[in-house]
Amino acid sequence: MQDFKFPKDFIWGTATASYQIEGAVNEDGRGLSIWDTFSHTSGKTAHGDTGDIACDHYHRYPEDVKLIKELGANAYRFSISWPRIFPKGAGKPNSKGTDFYSRLVDDLLEKGIKPAITLYHWDLPQTLEDTGGWRNRDTAYRFADFADYMFQKLDDRAHMWITLNEPLCSAYLGHLSGEHAPGIRNPQAAYSALHHLLLAHGLALGNYREVYNSNLIGITLNISTPQPASEKAAEADAVEVFLDQNTRMFLDPLFKKKYPERYLERLMKTNVLLPVENGDMEIISGNVDFLGLNYYFEFTISADESSPDGYRLVDKGFPKTAMGWDIVPEGLLRQLKWVGREYGNPVVYITENGAAFPDSLSENGTECHDPDRIDYLARHLQYLKQALEEGVNLKGYFLWSLIDNFEWAYGYDKRFGIIYCDFKTLERIPKDSYYFYRDYIAGNTDHG
Ligand code: GCO
């Protein structure tokens, strides 16, 4: 396997998201997002951290694009801030917002870097939240309008479109646990949001197919494919329940035109109904060009009658990242092969993979030695090679993240970047993992 090379056209990138890196939240006509509201609400984020400045990517993007170029990456995944384009969520577009992304895309293209554009990475315009947000079916149609506007403006230069990033987090963390914006804790709200997010994806996808259809379009999910804690039948059943709730509730509508029946029955017992209307499942299951997967860790599940879901997470003693996430590189291969078996071996991109560790600068402040991250990346990349050799339809890999950024409720406490961001000076300092990734891309791609 050592001499195996990734194909010449394999996509090597890094990933970021608008609210996590841009800053400039009150600049050039940008409207408020739910994450502006949430992060400015006391107690919601570590130390009351907000994305007000973040990495100041809005002003410093030329330096960041140069660093992407020097990495030797051939793609860059970023997201569009919806309230920068439509400050009120809909209606009159803000040309300064569109101009920013147009400049960014032109800078990327000039350096031979393909733009991989995520339309929704959680920063819903607050004005839409004020009228029900993702609990309101109308928001799906407002998203389709926003997506169409971005297709008009950027499809001539885009390489790939990702409609949504991790609808599971938007639905469950935003509306069930309340750990993320808008901070609601209500099962019906969560499952209405889940359905309307998938509908939003389907509406945008259908419009893209009909009107544009010149680049790749897909969706990014953070699914889980857990291991049972033992060989006991009860553990296997617990894994199936977990898969229904956290994986099939997203993949089945997208690829099988239906929600998992067993899980719908569970939901009905708790008086939760998915607001499915006629034709929705057809719209949602439109044909994507790829499935984006964000892989960080693999859960271990045990049956637990005392828990409402009938399962609990088990700590198997794996080494962990600063997020407390188990480091299980072989889980990446297991997940890719599970998706391939269950959903007809779709084209897949790893749209996020990476790790947070407690990084610090060297004495002289010019270096950042992060051997744990290099080890994490090297071990996961090795399983990508094996996945390709075993026939997984894998076309690309985006490392999370290009630069340390606002890690949602954790604020700036968790550093995922291969570039260290000094949040006091906003100086960028490439970590050792930046050079590792640069050399890995150069040394493991078939340049023939
Ligand atoms: C996610 C988001 C990113 C996170 C990253 C680390 O997957 O949760 O896409 O915004 O910052 O995954 O948690």
Image (tube, helix red, strand yellow):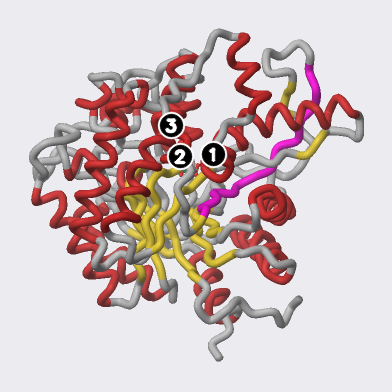
| Residue drawn where x is 59% and y is 16% of the image | 267
Mark 3, Cα crowd under 10 Å, few <14 / some 14-19 / many 20+, is many
On the image, numbered disc 3 is attached to which residue? 170
Task: Please state if 177 lies on the left or on the right of 99 as rendered.
Answer: right
Task: Please state if 231 lies on the left or on the right of 25 as rendered.
Answer: right
**Numbered badge on residue 257:** 1
Depth check: 112 or 272 in front?
272
The amino acid type found where label 1 is placed reads Lys
What is the spatial separation of the Cα atoms under label 1 and label 3, in whole angstroms?
Answer: 21 Å
* Residues rendered magenta in the picture: 291-304
Task: Please state if 28 lies on the left or on the right of 415 as rendered.
Answer: left
Can residue 362 be seen at all in this image of the molecule?
Answer: no
On the image, numbered disc 2 is attached to which residue? 282
| Residue drawn where x is 24% and y is 32% of the image | 125
Q: Is 301 colored magenta in this rendering?
A: yes
The amino acid type found where label 2 is placed reads Glu
